[in-house]
Image (cartoon, grey):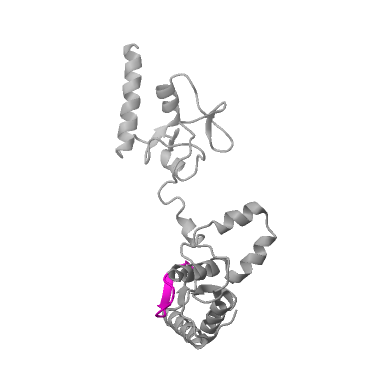
């Protein structure tokens, strides 16, 4: 590379450095602001030097040395099928998509069962179990499967603690009573039946009911310790105590 080549290289380097430092060269009529690129004037072009004015001709002559860049009808700077700089995907420029906030809903309001209703439901279910002469565990969860209330009657099976919680979780997840799953799965293939029953915390026998208000799921209640029919009856009593039915 001769002296002229070195001179062109250093001129290009100085142009880019001063531009990136905010010391842009004096604007000329042939120069276009790279800030235009940041704001979409040249779509699909990756800006290497933000906040600067660089002559398209200078970039063509000093940097590439061999190619001349032409402006297409779409505003892209091209040479045949080659784009100016590198056309890989890039992050949007700061402020370019500031209007998206008005179009995108960041948070969604969701109704869940309150703690007072959850507590009332488990107490009512326990009272019904006591009237049946059984000892049970009762759980209420919200729509996210989080435990909202739990009650264990003295003498209830220890293992049924988790079963009651999982019944409530299953009912809240799908919005169906757990007793409905046995018949529903008979219509499915063996792969579906075996696959779904092996899912963690999935219960396919009675005792879990979804909690719905105005046809909207707000949680689930699960009872374990008696027969399937007894467990479901206790869960129904819990719903009735908070003014809801299945």
Residue 99 or 182: which is nearer the viewer?
A: 182
- Looking at the figure, which quarter contains the C terminus? bottom right
Residue lying farthest to the top in this orientation: 2
Residue lying farthest to the bottom in this orientation: 131
Task: Give left or right: position of 178 versus 225.
Answer: right
Residue 77 or 149: which is nearer the viewer?
A: 149
**Residue 79: x and y, percent?**
54, 26
Task: Please indicate, yes or no, whether residue 176 appears anywhere in the rendered image.
Answer: no
Q: Residue at x 42, y 52 (%)?
A: 95
How many numbered callouts? 0
Please check the rendered image and state whether residue 147 is part of the magenta-colored stretch, yes or no: yes
Q: Which residues are magenta?
A: 143-158
Please check the rendered image and state whether residue 19 is part of the magenta-colored stretch, yes or no: no
Q: Residue at x 48, y 35 (%)?
A: 88
Residue 101 lies, with reference to residue 24, above or below; the image says below
Task: Please indicate, yes or no, whether residue 84 appears anywhere in the rendered image.
Answer: yes
Residue 210 or 152: which is nearer the viewer?
A: 152
**Residue 125: x and y, percent?**
49, 83
**Residue 111: x and y, percent?**
49, 74
**Residue 99: x and y, percent?**
48, 57
Q: Residue at x 57, y 59 (%)?
A: 197
Residue 62 or 206: which is nearer the viewer?
A: 206
- Looking at the figure, which quarter contains the N terminus? top left
Q: Main SS of the magenta segment? A: loop
């Amino acid at each position: 590379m001769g002296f002229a080549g070195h001179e062109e290289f250093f001129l290009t380097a100085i142009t880019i450095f001063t531009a990136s430092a905010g010391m842009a060269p004096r604007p000329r009529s042939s120069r276009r602001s790279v800030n235009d690129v940041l704001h979409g004037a040249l779509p699909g072009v990756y800006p290497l030097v933000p906040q600067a004015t660089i002559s398209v001709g200078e970039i063509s002559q000093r940097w590439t040395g061999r190619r001349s860049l032409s402006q297409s009808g779409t505003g892209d700077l091209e040479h045949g099928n080659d784009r100016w700089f590198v056309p890989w995907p890039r992050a949007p420029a700061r402020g370019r998509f500031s209007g998206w906030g008005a179009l995108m809903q960041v948070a969604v309001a969701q109704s869940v069962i309150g703690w007072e209703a959850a507590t009332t439901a488990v107490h009512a279910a326990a009272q019904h179990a006591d009237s049946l002469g059984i000892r049970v565990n009762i759980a209420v969860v919200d729509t996210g499967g989080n435990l909202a209330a739990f009650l264990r009657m003295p003498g209830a099976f220890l293992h049924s603690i988790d079963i009651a919680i999982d019944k409530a979780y299953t009912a809240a997840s799908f919005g169906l009573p757990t007793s409905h799953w046995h018949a529903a799965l008979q219509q499915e293939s063996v792969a579906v039946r075996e696959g779904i029953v092996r899912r963690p915390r999935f219960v396919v026998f009675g005792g879990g009911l979804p909690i719905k208000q105005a046809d909207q799921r707000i949680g689930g209640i699960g009872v374990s310790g008696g027969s399937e029919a007894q467990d479901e009856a206790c869960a129904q009593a819990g719903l009735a105590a908070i003014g809801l039915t299945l």
